[in-house]
Amino acid sequence: MLDAVFNNYNNDESIDFDFPYFSIDVGCIRDGSMKLSVLGCAGGLGGREKLTTCLQVDDDVLLDAGTGLSSLDLSQLLQIDHVFISHAHIDHVVGLAFMLDSVLGKRQAPVTVHATPGVIATLKAHLFNWKLWPDFSVIPDAEHPILHWSPLSFGSTVVLKERTFLSCEVNHTVEAAAYLVRSKERGFFFSGDMGSTPALWQQLAQEAHCDAVIVDCSFPDTEERIATLSKHFCPRALIEDIQPMPYSTQFLITHLKPGEEENVMRELRAHDGKRLFDSLKKGEIFSF
Ligand SMILES: [Zn+2]
Ligand SMILES: [Zn+2]
């Protein structure tokens, strides 16, 4: 089963990639392709364009909620109904705290936040705990909160208006999910932060509807020790991990540490000139 694959990413045994074996359809029919907008994708501060991870799917869904969320105005924030969180690190969630404050009292339905039970527990205990930030799951009251937590275990899929979001476990310093997002015959894979997860690529290589992979490669090879310690990729380690992936897959590199962007991209292309490597950039819009 898929959850077994992603719960045992250090196990090299091949297991059938069988999904969705569990899904929740809360949407209605929608037409046309799926839009992916890059609101932020930097690995840290360092300039007006260096906003941290936040991707927008169509007008109503976010993947992570880093400082890139500051790119949206209030009317756009009010259209966000669902947020999928990869992990609880602050560069991926800080925008959520501010967004809930901004839309409170201005929309009827709560904002639904999808994440693993472990990530939700961390965010409840350490962010929305009335000390660092209010508990928006009981504001304005417990019956009609602005924040609705929706636990999503590894290997499970949420369906929203014909778009499917499959949670996949990846290796990071904390519990972390990646998402395979598909619409009709097309799709992309998004990982917030991750280090080596060999079984993931073996299974993803079998997926017919994954046109692009968004993955972090935060550090250059000279900082491989730090990359390994913090469970991020450097070019050498990423190329070794993605060996099973077909050469037709586009790799969009994210979470680049400010000042290292050109080094990392040069090293990736030097190591494997046949791969399709591009750095993800704030403001880009893709259609799937
Ligand atoms: Zn990060
Ligand atoms: Zn992280």
Image: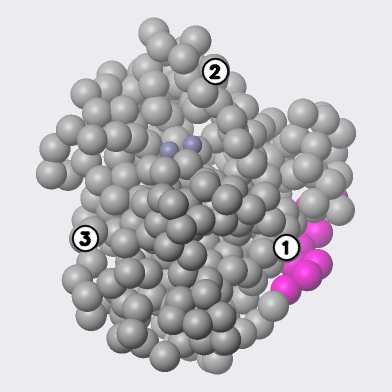
CA distance for labels 2 and 1: 28 Å
Q: Are marks 2 and 1 in contact (CB under 8 Å)?
A: no
In terms of secondary structure, where does tag 2 sit?
Answer: helix
- Amino acid under disc 1: Ser
The answer to whether 201 is drawn above or below residue 236 in the figure is below
**Quadrant in which the C terminus is drawn:** bottom left
Q: Which type of secondary structure does the marked residue at label 1 adopt?
A: loop
Q: Nearer the viewer, mark 3 or mark 1?
A: 3
Reading the image, the residue beneath label 3 is 71
Q: Please tell me whether the stretch drawn in magenta is mainly helix, strand or loop.
A: loop
- Residue 210: tell me if it is visible: no
Pointer 2: residues within 10 angstroms few (<14), some, or many (20+)?
some
Q: Position of residue 266 (x, y in %)?
A: 30, 21
Residue type of the residue flagged with mark 2: Thr
- Residue highlighted by disc 1: 156
Q: Is residue 84 visible?
A: yes
Q: Secondary structure at mark 3?
A: helix
Q: Which residues are magenta?
A: 16-23
In this picture, is 53 found above or below 62?
A: above
Q: CA distance from mark 3 to mark 1?
A: 30 Å
Instruction: Locate residue 36: give its quadrant.
Output: bottom left
Taking the spot 46% from the left edge, 76% from the top edge, the residue there is: 139
Please name the colour scheme applied to the rendered image: one colour
Where is residue 263 drawn, in percent x and y? 28, 19
Instruction: Determine which of the numbered discs, if any, sits on residue 228 in the image.
Output: 2
Residue 18: in magenta span: yes
